[in-house]
Image: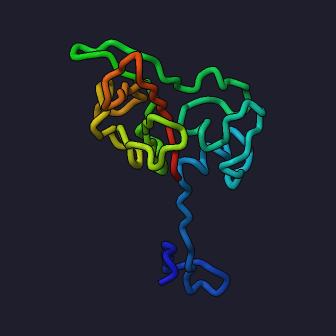
């Protein structure tokens, strides 16, 4: 009733009558935080190396929280596709990171709300959405996924793209 997983061992305990125990299953991000930050409960918003990337962003983008590496943040760029030219971004996705969602969005002005969703990966799953272009599959291993804007690029329009992480 409390949402935790319990078990019972028939023997053992101080009187030999058995033992009740609780299983604690950690999340992938908790394991990552313990390995890289020494604290499974470290803040998602912490920034150990002061590179401007929070722990949650470092986890999602497969960078190292102890080494300044903000240059590895995905950046939008104008790219040619078979049908036209569009703003695009390449985003890493690790299917083992089953406790986050990666959302790629675009807008014409930074004041515009809401942002338009281009593609989403939920709980480590493959990217889906109108802006998904390629590079992803349901097989194991890190993928570098291309997501493109849903609007063709023209010299008279401006577009912005962002990667948003939820946990």
- Say which residue appears at 57% left-offset and 48% top-offset: 29
* Closer-to-camera residue (140/159): 159
* Closer-to-camera residue (87/163): 87
Placement of 40 over or under 11, stated as above or below: above
Q: Residue 92: image x %, image y %?
A: 46, 29
- Say which residue appears at 43% left-offset and 36% top-offset: 106
Placement of 6 over or under 136, stated as above or below: below
- Say which residue appears at 47% left-offset and 84% top-offset: 1
Placement of 149 over or under 60, stated as above or below: above
Q: Residue 124: image x %, image y %?
A: 40, 43
Q: Answer with left or right where residue 63 lies relative to residue 3.
A: right
Q: Residue 120: image x %, image y %?
A: 37, 42
Q: Answer with left or right where residue 148 lies relative to residue 162.
A: left
* Closer-to-camera residue (126/152): 152
Quadrant hosting residue 154: top left
* Closer-to-camera residue (2/135): 135
Q: Residue 108: image x %, image y %?
A: 44, 34
Q: Answer with left or right where residue 43 lies relative to residue 9.
A: right
- Say which residue appears at 46% left-offset and 18% top-offset: 77
């Amino acid at each position: 009733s409390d949402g935790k997983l319990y078990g019972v061992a028939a023997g053992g305990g101080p009187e030999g009558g058995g033992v009740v125990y609780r299983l604690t299953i950690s999340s992938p991000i908790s394991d990552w935080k313990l390995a890289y930050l020494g604290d499974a409960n470290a803040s998602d918003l912490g920034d150990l190396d002061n590179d401007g990337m929070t722990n949650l962003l470092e986890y999602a983008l497969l960078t190292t929280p102890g080494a300044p590496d903000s240059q590895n943040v995905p950046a939008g760029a104008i790219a040619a596709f078979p049908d036209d030219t569009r703003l695009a971004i390449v985003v890493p996705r690790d299917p083992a990171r089953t406790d986050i969602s990666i959302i790629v969005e675009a807008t014409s002005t930074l004041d515009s709300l809401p942002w338009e969703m281009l593609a989403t990966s939920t709980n480590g799953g493959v990217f889906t959405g109108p802006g998904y272009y390629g590079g992803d599959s349901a097989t194991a291993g890190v993928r570098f996924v291309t997501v493109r804007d849903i609007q063709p690029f023209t010299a008279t329009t401006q577009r912005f793209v962002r990667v948003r992480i939820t946990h």
